[in-house]
Image (cartoon, grey):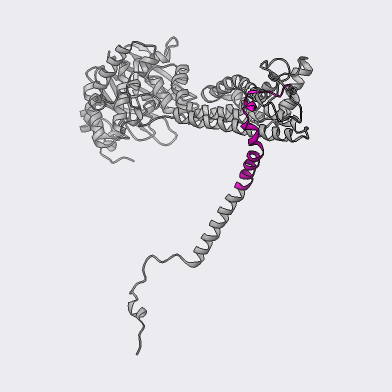
Amino acid sequence: MTTTASTLDRPATPPAFQAVSGSRKIKNMVATVLVVLAFLIALVPLVWLLISVIARGYQALLSSDWWTHSLKGVLPKEFAGGAYHAIIGTLLQTIVCAVIAVPVGVLAAIYLVEYGRGRLARVTTFMVDILSGVPSIVAALFIYALFLSTFGLGQSAFAVSMALVLLMLPVVVRSTEEMLRLVPQELREASYALGVPKWKTIVRIVLPTALSGVVTGVMLAMARVMGETAPVLVLVGYSKSINFNIFDGNMTSLPLLIYSELNNPNPAGQLRVWGAALTLIILIMLFNLVAALVSRFSAIKTK
Amino acid sequence: MAKRIDVKDLNIFYGKFHAVDRVTLAVPPRSVTAFIGPSGCGKSTVLRSLNRMHEVTPGARVEGKVLLDGEDIYASAVDPVEVRRTIGMVFQRPNPFPTMSIRDNVVAGLRLGGMRNKKQLDEIAERSLRGANLWAEVSDRLDKPGGSLSGGQQQRLCIARAIAVQPDVLLMDEPCSALDPISTLAIEDLIGELKKDYTIVIVTHNMQQAARVSDQTAFFNLHGVGQPGRLVEIDDTEKIFSNPGQQATEDYISGRFG
């Protein structure tokens, strides 16, 4: 009689918990591999794009002229001059756009969340939805038809800013609306119960509570319109020199500089294209960074 | 300070829904009145109509009168903001303002009302925190955010905030339902002290609490879902809990309800 050890050791009742079955291990492994692969595939174009922009453009940014000089009097084949005029143009157009779009957008969101009832609110929400679906070229054409064809004004950076307002407004309204809706109704009631009027409750309680999110939304919206190209192609002319006047004359922005230098077959032109692209990416990244910092410092503290 | 409230034939509606049917009751000054009753019977709704807070809900309206020392708070010339300044409220869940420090929370009503004098504000903050039995616990960290306190402390902070504006009446909507027994005891002790200066109306689901803190008790009930809530009876707390006038009240307080 031979009895193997395993049969001797067998418990009367099988244990309640058993090892992970083989088929589940395999499924788990397959799923893990697929998820990681998808992540890597999504990452490839992003990293590739960044690397090629940096590799081809970084040399332009190393020269101090890039940040301080325009292209005035610089020949197409000359490795000289800089993108100062385009950086100023991009910042001016974006800031003018934000100065108009942010107050209008935030106030519209306050109306929708705090006062909006009935038809007017529904119409406003509907319009905002439509506006957020408008392609940038359509916004540019609308401003062209209104400012240039109807009012007979010339091309100007201000027209660009107005087209950017059309693109930025729905983003600001939507993000502010979301943030205001996150403020608990209880806080508003607590304020009313102290005998604080509604407008003061909104200004002193609701807005400060939502501030961090509102500012983040605004910064991201600004970063978003900064790279818009269609309005600058349609509404303003290219200039090689610096122009601080948004109401008059041609003003170059970074997308416009890229577009115009694409027609320049010289190696110097190629460097300017990639340099301007890298500068634009850095500017947008800075805005995102500022947004992150602002939201961290204005966030509600509980310690 | 400390005014009386008389409610006469008060009907409350949310849109077309008739929420509360013909409530008439009187709350004497410097006393505690407890509202008890099953969920959905309209006791919180009645409480919120006493300082026109229910109007914040869209579609809500009332018929009837609420008199504060004889003056109708629903008269057309009366500003609801003034009413709420006179009749303060403490809510079910502690709701300190998250962007403000402990000190700023306490004097929020005064500062938003336009008071600028820092010395005076600090004095009122201390007095109100002492009044809410919280001073000893927070005096060394008045600049910390209100959200850093525990739930029970936050609720006492909210009471301090409510009494800082020196209302005539204090309404409390289940102020202890989110708190542990020790914090609840602290609030109940506080209610006993506040009674000396304020007229207090408190909604509670806890019948022992009603028996412990109140001078008179009002029992609300409703016939069924979709029916308006109504006041079954109001009387001295002792009488309600020992010898109620209505069968429904006796069923409710003895746990034989429904």
Q: Decide whether residue B14 is among the magenta residues.
A: no
Q: Is residue B215 visible?
A: no
Measured as percent of width and height from the top left, residue A103 is found at 57, 20
Q: Residue at x 72, y 15 (%)?
A: A248
Magenta range is A43-72
Q: Nearer the viewer, residue B40 or B124?
A: B124
Q: How many marks?
A: 0
Q: Nearer the viewer, residue B160 or B206?
A: B160
Q: Nearer the viewer, residue A50 or A167?
A: A50
Q: Quadrant of residue B68?
A: top left
Q: Residue at x 64, y 40 (%)?
A: A55
Q: Seen in the image, is B244 located left or right of residue A210?
A: left
Secondary structure predominantly adopted by residues drawn in magenta:
helix
Q: Quadrant of the C terminus of chain B?
A: top left
Measured as percent of width and height from the top left, residue A291 is found at 52, 30
Q: Nearer the viewer, residue A217 or B205?
A: A217
Determine whether A277 is above or below A240 in the image: below
Q: Decide whether residue A52 is among the magenta residues.
A: yes
Q: Seen in the image, is B26 located left or right of residue A65?
A: left
Q: Residue at x 28, y 33 (%)?
A: B249
